[in-house]
Image (tube, grey):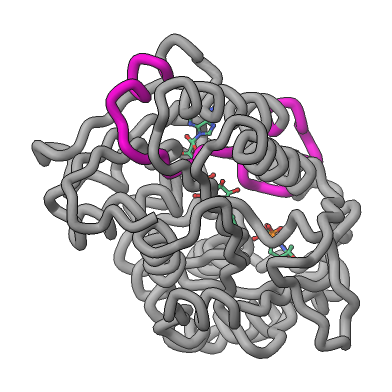
Amino acid sequence: MSTSNTKKTLLVTGGAGFIGSNFILYWMKHHPEDKIINLDALTYAGNLENLRSIQDSKNYIFVEGNIVDRDLVERIVADVDMIVHFAAESHVDRSILEPDAFVQTNIVGTQVLLDLAVKHKVKHFHHISTDEVFGSLELGKDTQFSETTPYDPRSPYSASKASSDHLVRAYGETYGLQYTITNCSNNYGEYQFPEKLIPLAITNILDNKAVPVYGDGLQVRDWLYVQDHCSAIEKVLESGSSQKTYVVGGLTEDIPNIEVVKTILKIMGKSEHMLEHITDRAGHDVRYSVDWSHIKKDLGWEPSVSFEVGIEQTITWYLANESWWRPLLSDNQDYFKKNYQDRT
Ligand code: NAD
Ligand code: TYD
């Protein structure tokens, strides 16, 4: 699906969120000839501060709006070559507390985009998904998720993302939509909302607050530095095969959550006493691990940084950008109370 040398217009959905904003900054740096339209509803997770450096660029347009708004999406899609679809409700804990928005945005919103992509013959629909659609691997085993792993989602979040993946493939089969999908592992890095484990740990430590670890903390995630995720998406957009899925991960060895937190505490010069075990998450998936050998072999992509390097860079960024994350904590007190109260 190579369109790399021609000037393109990309519709990026959810471009004011964590990964979407990193992707827009990455794409505008590496493809300055292209035009980007960023459609984002600015939920609690959307933040235009992330894009301040490019907000006045002539190749960039921001549209505040919801992907379920068919009329609005239709007006935008009529002029785009490619859709890169990030917009989603993305936090598992919020999906446990309030699943409705996950169904609306992740399923219905994706279907609206798909309908209009077909109607307006968009050349390439790229869907950003997650390894969580595959369910949970056993602890202590060396099994991994790959492009052929059957779906087995277990949270409202992962079930809604699995539904969206199925819809994308169905539109490919039924209507001939030219699509690609990436199912990637847990991202971390600059501009991540401090509700997810890594930025939550860093910002709690900076505030001298305990770091909450769910259950025994032996659960495992596959950590992918956000810049490496952006370069993987770039490879797929430029050279991926149509109607194909790529799984993307960042590690080759398991790192339990408790070790992630201890590493952060160590780098920040704090005692392990700041780690606090709290009541486990309902339906907690115990282990994710991604076999990313296929995208490496097929497209020549691999992560550029180790977890040790990526986490240092991330901590340095949060230390230097307190004015970015501090207001997010105060503006979202209700959520933090709801999720963490009565769990010790
Ligand atoms: P995020 O929560 O940081 O950002 C989501 C963005 O989508 C926000 O800017 C929000 O305002 C916007 N949005 C939400 N609902 C919308 C709607 N109805 N219409 C328009 N915009 C809307 O999410 P993220 O971490 O950047 O994740 C981006 C994508 O990557 C998601 O599809 C997510 O499922 C996927 N993903 C994330 C991770 C991760 O570790 N963060 C891992 C794998 C896959
Ligand atoms: P999270 O960052 O929420 O991502 P996901 O649930 O999509 O994997 O959580 C990463 C891991 O860290 C997961 O196993 C849950 C755990 N966790 C905690 O132990 N404490 C916390 O406060 C949070 C937010 C997560």
Q: Is residue 247 left or right of residue 26?
A: right
Q: Is residue 207 left or right of residue 190?
A: right
Q: Residue at x 65, y 25 (%)?
A: 108
Asked if the stretch drawn in magenta spans residue 94, the answer is: yes
Front-lying residue, 141 or 7: 7
Q: Residue at x 36, y 75 (%)?
A: 316
Give the image location of residue 54, x and y in percent. 17, 46
Magenta region? 73-102
Front-lying residue, 338 or 12: 12
Number of disc labels: 0
Front-lying residue, 106 or 255: 106
Give the image location of residue 154, x and y in percent. 86, 51
Q: In which quadrant is the N terminus drawn?
A: bottom left
Q: Is residue 125 left or right of residue 35?
A: right
Asked which quadrant contains residue 14, the reply is top left
Asked if the stretch drawn in magenta spans residue 262, the answer is: no
Above or below, 178 against 266 in this view is above
Asked which quadrant contains residue 59, the reply is top left
Front-lying residue, 81 or 327: 81
Q: Is residue 47 visible?
A: no
Q: Is residue 163 left or right of residue 216?
A: left
Give the image location of residue 280, x and y in percent. 87, 60
Q: Residue at x 43, y 74 (%)?
A: 315
Above or below, 180 against 40 in this view is below
Q: Residue at x 29, y 43 (%)?
A: 49
- In the picture as drawn, the residue positioned furthest to the top comes out as 71
Q: Is residue 116 visible?
A: yes
Q: In which quadrant is the C terminus drawn?
A: bottom right
Give the image location of residue 207, x and y in percent. 51, 63
Asked which quadrant contains residue 249, the reply is bottom right
